[in-house]
Image (spheres, rainbow, N blue to C red):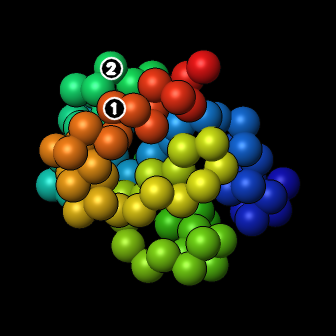
Amino acid sequence: MDVMEHIKQSIESNPVILFMKGTPEFPQCGFSSRSSQALAACGAEFAYINVLAEPEVRENLHRYADWPTFPQLYVNGELIGGCDIVIEMYESGDLQTLVEQASK
């Protein structure tokens, strides 16, 4: 499967997906850790892709949504943003609302 198709299919088949460095249990970057912890604190069920384990995804994800950094959070197929946006939304309560709506 083409890497862009793999990215698209991953985003479209998961209501909440985080492209991150490492895994939620063993994050390999502070930003990825904070983002996955914010999602977990909201009680969100979320998929993730470890971009360190999938170098083609890491090299091409920025082309998918024109977002240059990791992590990248997608909800219902829409790019929400990176760590700063995720944390800001968590602190305001908007992340909780967003993930609850996505799970319906």
Quarter of the image where one finds residue 102: top right
Location of residue 57 in the rendering, given as x and y in whole percent from the top left corner: 58, 62
Residue linked to disc 1 = 96
Question: For mark 1, does the 10 Å Cα neighbourhood hold few (<14), some (14 to 19), or many (20 or more) residues?
Answer: many
Would residue 89 be seen by someone viewing this image from the given angle?
A: yes
Which mark is first along the chain, 1 or 2? 2
Residue at point 63% right, 42% down?
76
Q: Does the residue at mark 2 contact the one at mark 1 (Cβ under 8 Å)? A: yes
Residue linked to disc 2 = 43
- Of all residues, the one furthest to the right in this rendering is 1
Quarter of the image where one finds residue 7: bottom right
Indicate whether 66 appears above or below 17: below
- Secondary structure at badge 2 equals loop
Judging depth in this view, the residue of 79 and 31 nearest the camera is 79
Q: Quadrant of the C terminus?
A: top right
Left or right relative to 57: residue 8: right
Left or right relative to 64: residue 74: left
Q: Quadrant of the N terminus?
A: bottom right
Residue at point 35% right, 62% down?
82
Judging depth in this view, the residue of 61 and 42 nearest the camera is 42
Residue at point 20% right, 45% down?
92
Residue type beneath disc 1: Gln
Residue type beneath disc 2: Gly
User: What numbered label is drawn on residue 84?
Assistant: none
Quarter of the image where one finds residue 90: top left
